[in-house]
Amino acid sequence: MESGIYADNCYNSTIEKNVILNSGIFISGPGANSNFTISDNLIINGDISVHDGSYNCVLLNNTLLNGGIGVAQGPGCKILDNYISSDGRGGIAFSESSSNIIDNNFITNASYGISMPFFSDSDITNNTIISNTVGIFIAHYSSGSLIKNNTISNNGIGISLDDFALVTDNRIELNKECGIYFDHSEEHEGSSSDSRIHNNLFNNTVNLFNSSRTENLESENPRYTPGSAVWNITKTPGTSITGGPYLGGNFWAKPDGTGFSQRCNDWDGDGIGDSIYTINTYDVDYLPLVSMSKTRQQVFPVANFSTNVSNGYVPLSVLFTDFSQNETSRVWDFDNDGVTDSIDKNPVHVYPVPGIYTVNLTVSNENGTSSRLYPVTASNRPQYTLTEYQITTNNSNQTMPSIYGDKIVFLDDRSGWNNIYMYDLSTSKEAQITTSESKKEYPAIFEDRIVWQEYSNNTNTRDKSDIHMYKSFYFKRNSGHQ
């Protein structure tokens, strides 16, 4: 289906199991509880958009390739188990919407994996967010959300907080600019400095970037305290994100192994560092977690791959290159039919039949699995019908044809001399280019110019020759050559 689906002010409706190309699904209204479900759709080069008050929608198990999900003025939405590979635009974007649940989605290749301007009190849980410009963006005036148990890796920025949130149990790793970014802007009443952040695993070259500036320390705004987030809870029995016996602060690592938690002592073995971690002037983790033994560490796989081509004519041969992380095994399903097609690291697969195929790479290790989907389009080669046309029909001889675009030039001896004629395929009309009584040979045409070889005598024999050119811009039917 290419035209997409649009629903306006609908109740108790379900849109499911559609394949939509170059369009999407658009839901508007009704400004009340719509009880609307959008599930199990495959959308290529299009979006799912819910706006203008469609309350309590459920968006479940959809696959969007080169697209995303947008919700505006639609509170109470549940966005669950979707796979989103964007094209540099937004992955899941909310605006003026509260009390939403965003759970167990896979989001990649977006500008913002999940973005939340002007919203509050939503749960962002159990999502895998990789290879985006920003993984999760909580904008100003977007307070009170829960960010829990997400895998946020290989983004530019892992989490950008401009307002307060509870951030816990997340793995925030290998993000290029920083793991978490704070905007402590004095002009906004809400601030990321109100956030509660604990039991997260940070493993980035820069784990925190705090945009507070020195001059903010003497702010005259009584509502604004540049300060810090709260980076730990009271030491509490429970299994930490690193497998330790107590909850407290966060695990602070760096990819090169020099992070605070990777070097801090833990003489009593409680999984809490023996020293506090002063992150910067404003931010202190008083109960930082420390490294557990490698035999107890849980490392999860992350599926990722590239192709040498993503579309072409059948039989289409595609080379797949696996650059997943932490995997011990892999399964390629080249048409996502649930049947294993290869376990090689970098296989080649040939698509003999036209179609839009969804490639599924699933990688595993002892701690879990991870999958990535990607579209491949195999098309039939264009079919051409070859038809022969006779251009000239008179009894004279026509020789030495040359063609450019819709114009054909040739020699014709109908007047007793070889003169040059031009035939226009677009109009089916013939025009005489030269009228002189001299021998001419080898006409050629390029754009608006015709050139030929012409002999200076008038005996229709070869003697001294010259090159002549005719510019068709000045052409008038039956005129002599110039």
Image (cartoon, rainbow, N blue to C red):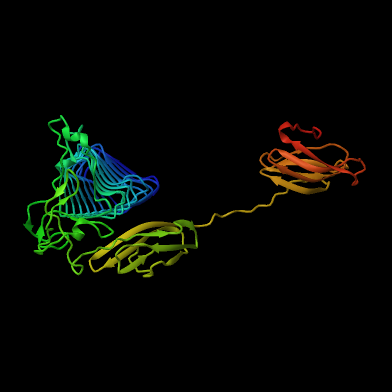
Q: Position of residue 441 (x, y in %)?
A: 82, 46
Q: Is residue 71 above or below residue 334?
A: above
Q: Foreground residue, 126 or 312?
A: 126
Where is residue 247, by image quadrant? Answer: bottom left
In which quadrant of the rendered image does the C terminus lie?
top right
Q: Is residue 343 above or below residue 103?
A: below
Which residue is pictured at 50% across the width and 61% down the height? 314
Q: Foreground residue, 432 or 110?
A: 110
Which residue of the protein is positioned furthest toward the right in this rendering? Answer: 459
Q: Position of residue 92 (x, y in %)?
A: 28, 46
Which residue is pictured at 36% across the width and 46% down the height? 88
Q: Foreground residue, 189 or 408?
A: 189
Judge whether residue 330 can be spotted in this image. Answer: yes
Q: Position of residue 236 (x, y in %)?
A: 6, 56
Judge whether residue 185 can be spotted in this image. Answer: no
Q: Is residue 112 left or right of residue 390?
A: left
Where is residue 248, by image quadrant? Answer: bottom left
